[in-house]
Image (spheres, grey):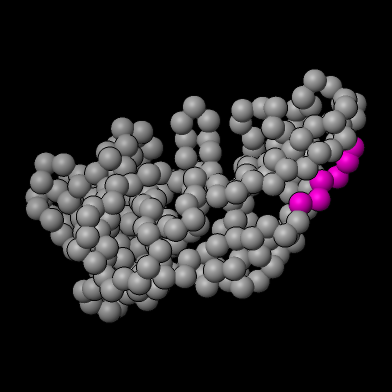
Amino acid sequence: MFGATATAGCLDAFRTGPTTVSDPTTGPGPTTAGPSRVTTVDGHVIDVGSMDVQASILTMGVHTDVRAYRAASFLRVPVVLGDLSGEPVTDADANARIRDGASTSIDGGASITAHLDHAHDGPGVVLAMAVPTGEYASGEVRLDLGAGNSIHVPIIRSALAAFADPPAFAVHGLAIDEPIEGDSLHATVTIENVGGTAGRFLAELGPTSVSDSPEFHFDVPSHEEVRHDVSVPFTAPGGSGDATIRLDWGVDQLERSVEVGGS
């Protein structure tokens, strides 16, 4: 996402006060795609990446958990903080400042605070705001960086449209290879995206006897059904015998009783 050649000529530098960052190919206002919006603030480069709308996110507390709502979806906004040479900054405090100062507003309504989606392996953070399902005309993401510095980024039109018919998943099958042997659990899940927007199916899979289970995710096009093979780490609950395996995708769960063999 970062690179000196990519940011040259694209920086909107300022010292204090708010700025609105928009797609240079279309002028101010929402866009139909999600190009990076790059801004310099207080000696750093803030790169706001392509927004999308997803059914669920991965939150982190004592454990990582899938969070989802039946009547809301999540606006996801990747944000990378970098130095002026184009290198991402890995300072946890700096990234926490981005999270704590982030919010969104839809159609001039109340501010929606941000969570972090931890189902993310790249640099920076992915902000996630839960937006009730509905039709919206406009919105913006605000990053309050302190000392009078803030960034206002319009929500792209494709994301606004997705709020009316977001990704939504129906689980039609969970087949687990048994007996489960060794330290891996192998399964096949059959998932249908019954929503009007392509999305990521995110779930936990593991025995009910443990407090935290591994997560997995894969993409499912809108109005399509996908069979997906899954392998996750497995710890036998007390050796051989039977175990109850739970698939948890945030808004619902599915359980299967399976045989566990020796390790």
Seen from the viewer's position, the closer of residues 162 and 36 is 162
The location of residue 17, given as percent across then percent down, is: 9, 53
When the figure is inspected, residue 197 is found, relative to residue 169, above or below; the finding is below
Seen from the viewer's position, the closer of residues 224 and 132 is 132
Q: How many numbered tags mark residues here? A: 0
The answer to whether residue 117 is left or right of residue 81 is right
38 magenta-colored: no
The answer to whether residue 180 is left or right of residue 39 is right
Give, as a single range, the part of the protein colored magenta: 174-179
The answer to whether residue 179 is left or right of residue 250 is right
The location of residue 142, given as percent across then percent down, is: 23, 54
The location of residue 20, given as percent across then percent down, is: 18, 63
When the figure is inspected, residue 169 is found, relative to residue 123, above or below; the finding is below
When the figure is inspected, residue 41 is found, relative to residue 29, above or below; the finding is above
Point 29% across, 78% down: residue:
25
- Using the rendered image of the protein, determine whether residue 208 is visible from the camera's viewpoint: yes
Residue at the far top in the pictured view: 238
- Using the rendered image of the protein, determine whether residue 121 is visible from the camera's viewpoint: no
The location of residue 24, given as percent across then percent down, is: 26, 73
Point 60% across, 60% down: residue:
169
Quadrant (top left, top right, bottom left, bottom right) of the C terminus: top right
Quadrant (top left, top right, bottom left, bottom right) of the N terminus: bottom left
Point 15% across, 59% down: residue:
19
Image quadrant where residue 51 sits: bottom left
Point 49% across, 27% down: residue:
62
